[in-house]
Amino acid sequence: MSLLSDLINLDLTETTSKIIAEYIWIGGSGLDLRSKARTLPGPVTDPAKLPKWNYDGSSTGQAPGDDSEVIIYPQAIFKDPFRRGNNILVMCDAYTPAGEPIPTNKRFNASKIFSHPDVVAEEPWYGIEQEYTLLQKDVKWPLGWPVGGYPGPQGPYYCGVGADKALGRDIVDSHYKACLYAGINISGINGEVMPGQWEFQVGPSVGISAGDQLWVARYILERITEIAGVVLSFDPKPIQGDWNGAGAHTNYSTKSMRNEGGFEVIKKAIEKLGARHKDHIAAYGEGNERRLTGHHETADINTFSWGVANRGASVRVGRDTEKDGKGYFEDRRPASNMDPYIVTSMIAETTILRKP
């Protein structure tokens, strides 16, 4: 095994200028991540200089067998924390051979929204709080829980310390450092209310980069759990009963909100979100009705509400924002399995482009 480890960790720069690029894309479910690697003649830092590639879309649920070729366009580059050196991870989106975005390519429309002059002028910032649950591989039950049984009730686990409270910290810390190495603007981690559940935060990120960074952070976490022999779940309510669900709270601000008088802009933006509540809920992740019950720090899925420091509201405004008269707000409705391209662009579209 030590020889295998040595080979995995070989420093290619000692013998060749070639690099390995791992191309990443989103599969047919809209949540599954796929990737494959190719050799390039030398280091690349601009995605526009990377070659397009293709894959068998009939094997990912994205194309029929008699016309299976899907083309992937490189969109963002990150350093590869697994191969290291000059090797890279490449976030891609998917198109038909004719150049049309395939139905699961949600980045394409998001990019159009973020390229709109009115949106560009407002410099939308996002901070996404990605919650997830670690599961035992063979039984699909939370990590550290007795098989077929339950741990003690919620209370000691949130930001908890100790072998009976912090279940899977080695995976979480590995992911934290790997994201920093990759160039992802990961801003923190913490243990969540349900044991075996954790959160990482990505941001502040501007525009389309918020989606790119969160998807690659998810990819890195999938790879680390693969190594650890643990299953990663983004199910918004993995365990029924008196246990917290998993969300992807999305913190958001525009230039107008961050400037003097921004609190009034925030309130108008929240009004617009309330007017499109059903549309947003429909786009905020599958199975969210199991999570948004009005309990366990959530608002009821059918009712829009907002408040200052209220974690039982659809949208929360922080005390500092109220005090300063400017800042940001948090949309608490997105589920842990949401597509960040959809959520971030939809918030921008509703609050910036949509007229009152």
Image (cartoon, rainbow, N blue to C red):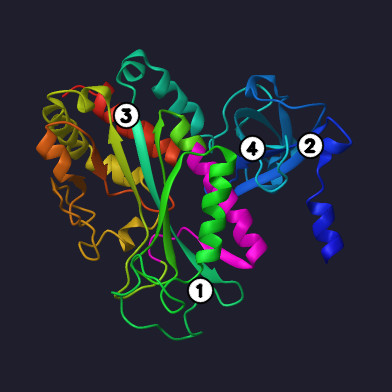
Q: Quadrant of the N terminus?
A: bottom right
Q: Which mark is residue 79?
A: 4
Q: Could you tell which of marks 1 and 4 lies nearer the N-terminus?
A: 4
* Residue 285 pos. (x, y %): 39, 50
Residue located at (46% from left, 25% from top): 111
Q: Are marks 3 and 4 in contact (CB under 8 Å)?
A: no
Q: CA distance from mark 3 to mark 4?
A: 29 Å
Q: Is residue 276 above or below residue 352?
A: below
Q: Could you tell which of marks 2 and 4 lies nearer the N-terminus?
A: 2
Q: Secondary structure at mark 3?
A: helix
Q: Which mark is residue 143?
A: 1
Chain part drawn in magenta: 213-237
Q: Could you tell which of marks 3 and 1 lies nearer the N-terminus?
A: 1
* Residue of label 2: 38
> What's the amino acid at mark 1?
Leu
> What's the amino acid at mark 4?
Lys
